[in-house]
Image (spheres, coloured by chain):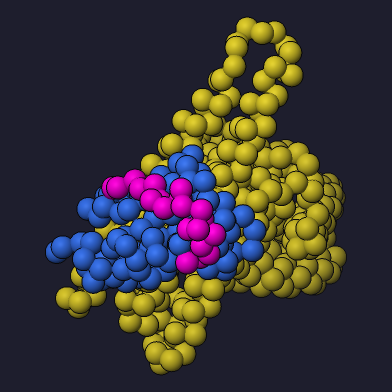
Amino acid sequence: MNSKGDSVARDNFTHYFTGVKGEIIVKAVQENQRLKRAIWMANHRVGETGVSDSGPLQQSLIYGIHGSTSTATDYFNQQGAAYFGELEEALMHGVDGMKSDGDRKAYPTARPLTLEIFPSWPMRYQQIIRGKSQSAGSPDSGSAQNTISQLESDSPVSIKVCSDHSGHQKQQEMMASDASRTGAAAAEQQDGAQEKRKAAGSARKEGKLLDAKTVRRLAQNREAAKKSRLRKKQLESSRIRLQQLEQELQRARSQGIFLGGCSASGDINSGAAIFDMEYAQWLDDYGKHLSELRGGLQAHLLDVNLSLIVDQCIAHHDDLFNLKAAVAKSDVFHLLSGMWTSPAERCFLWMGGFRPSELIKILMPQLDPLTEQQLMGICSLQQSSQQAEEALSQGLEQLHQSLAETVASGPFNDGANAANYMSQMVVALEKVAHLEGFVRQADHLRQQTLHQLRRILTVRQAARCFLAIGEYYSRLRLLSSLWASRPGENFIANESAFPTATDLQVIHQSQQNQFPAF
Amino acid sequence: MQYESAPEYWYVRQSRADPLERVERLASESAVVVFSLSTCCMCHAVKRLFCGMGVHPTVYELDEDPRGRDMERALARLVGAAGPPPLPVVFIGGKLVGAMDMVMASHINGTLVPLLKEAGALWL
C-alpha cells in the first residue's frame, strides 16, 4: 500500500467490504460464474441478439468498481424501452405454461406489468428470453423449453444474487472482480464465443416468415445490439487505457519521476518526495518478500533454505533504514512528521518509526511456543529496548526544550526585524541538526532489535515473526484506507480515482489472511 | 553520577601530556566513564540510560575542560569517526565501548549488562 497521498483517493470502494468474509467472496465468484453461464446459454438459444451480450455486464464485472455503477445502469436504461415492447408481446401470448417455483421474483410474467420494477437486471434477461422464445415460435421450441428449464434451475441462484440490494450486488461484483481479475481473460474468451454464436443464430432466423411487428422488433434488437457492442468497445478501450496508465505509473515510479499526489512536498527533487517514492517501492517489494516467506513456511522448506528467505527479509528492513538515514540528512522534519506513512501507523509513530518494545509486545503471542531460554531472551530484549527508548526520548525532550528556548530567546514584539534574532536562528538551526542524530539512533535501535530477534528465534519462528510484523503493518495500512474511505467521507469526490492492481491485491490478500497464524 | 574536573591541569609539565594518554588514564579510574558535553542532548540521553539501569557513571564534561578540545580529537580517533567528535563516548572497566550507537547495540544484544557487572558498576 502506498503513501498517504494515495490512501485517501484510492480504496473508496472498500466501504462495500464492511462485514465481508472470505466465504462470501468465494460464493460471489461462483454465483458470478453461474450467472455468466446462464447468460451465455440464453444468448446461444435465442439467437437474435436482443439480449445482446452480457458484454457490458461482464465488462462491469471485470472492470469492477468504476464501470459497474454508471455503465450498467446506463445500459439498462437504454435497453429498458426496447424490451418493454417485447415483454408486452410475451404477456399477450401468455406464459401460463410457466410454472412458478415459488421463487420470489421468478415468473412475474404471469403477473401484470408491475414486474418491470426489478432492481436486478438478470431477471429481465431471463423473462425476455422466455418471452421471445415463446413469441418467436422458433422451430427449436423443444430446445427452448430445455433452455427455459435450465434457466429455471439457474434462476434460483441468479435470483439469490439479484434479489440482494443493488449495493450488495455491486459488492459482489466488486469482490468478483477482485477475486477474478485473472478470470477477465477467461470471461473475454466467453464473450468471443458468444459473438460467434450470435452470428450463427441470426442466420437461422432468415428462413422464417416475418410479420411487420417481428420485423420491427428485430430491427430494434439489432439497434440495441449495436449499441451494446459499441458500449462494450468503449469499456474495453477504457480498461486498456487504465492498464496502460498503471504501467506508466509503475515505470515512472521506478525512474524516479514524481507524478503528483504522493508526496507532502511539492518539489519533485526534494528529499521528502524522493523518499516517498522510494518508500512506495519498498512497500511493493516488502509484499513480495512476505509472500515468499509465507510460501516458504507453507511449503515446509528446509531450515537452511528458509533461513535464506528470512535473511533476505531482514536485509530488506535494513534497506529501509538506509533510505531513512539518507532522508534524515536532507529533511528530518519529514521523517519525524510521519507524513510518509499511513495515518494509522502515524498514530503510533515514535521518533520517525515504530517503537521496538511495542512491536515485541505485539509479537510475543505470535511466537509461541518458545523455550524458557527464548522467553527470557525476548523479555530482556523488550526491557532493554524499553530502557533505550526511554533514554532517547528524554534526550529528545531536552533537545526540544533547548530548541524552544533558543527560538524564544531575545526580545519579542520587535517587529519584523529578523536581523534581531538571526543569530538565534543560526543557533536554532544547529540544534535542529541534532534531531537527525536522534532519528538515526532510533532507527539504529529498531534495526538492532530486529537483528536480535533473529538471533533469539529458530528459523521457522523467525519466519513467522517477520511475517507477523508485515501482517500487522499491512493491517494498520488497511485500517488507514478503510478509515479514509468510510461512507460519506470522500467517496463521492473520489469516484474517479482507481485503486491500483497492487492495492486490490493487497486488499484481497489481507481479506484472505484474516485468519492466519494470528 | 560524579562530575570530575581533571585534577592536574595547572601543572605545565602535565599539560603537555598526550591527550590520548589522559583519556585512557581517566577512563581506567572508574568503572563507567562517560566523556560528554554539557550542552549535548545525546550525552544527556546516555546519562539517562545508565541512571535508568541503576548505574552511576563518572562524567567528564569536555566543554568545561581547558584541554577538552584535544581530548575530543583523541576520542574521535579512538572511536574511528571521520568528522566531528561523536560524543558521548563510553568506557566500561577501562575498555572502550564506543559512541551512543555502540552502547545501544551492546545493550540490545545483551552484552552491556554483563560488562557492567564485570566492571562492578552493577550488582544483580
In this picture, is A388 found above or below A310? above
Task: Give the camera-side residue of A146 and B17.
Answer: B17
On the question of residue A26 being in view, the answer is: no
**In the rendered picture, chain B carries what hue?**
blue
| Relative vertical location of residue A504 with respect to residue A290 in this rendering, above or below | above
Q: Residue at x 44, y 85 (%)?
A: A306
Residue placed at 63% from the left, 7% from the top? A413
Tell me if residue A193 is in the magenta stretch.
Answer: no
Task: Judge from the rendering whether residue A512 lies leftward or rightward of residue A324; answer left or right.
Answer: left
Q: Which of the 4 quarters of the picture holds residue A461?
A: bottom left
**Which percent across, then down, holds residue B104?**
40, 61
Q: Is residue A362 above or below residue A347?
A: below
Q: Does B14 lie within the magenta span?
A: yes
Q: Position of residue B32 (x, y in %)?
A: 31, 60
* Left or right of B78, for residue A329: right
How many marks on residues? 0
User: What segment carries the magenta color?
Assistant: B1-21
Pick whichever, A320 or A505, lies toward us.
A320
Rendered residue at 43%/91% (across/down): A304
Q: Is residue B29 above or below residue B10?
A: below
Front-lying residue, A472 or A510: A472
Q: Quadrant of the N terminus of chain A?
A: bottom right
Quarter of the image containing the C terminus of chain A? Answer: bottom left
Task: Name which residue lies at 61% across and 32% down.
Answer: A428
In the rendered structure, the answer to whether residue A507 lies left or right of residue A92 reads left
Q: Quick check: can you spot residue A456?
A: yes
Task: Please give left or right for residue B94 compared with residue A508 in the image.
Answer: left
Q: Which chain is yellow?
A: A
Percent x, y of residue A252: 80, 59
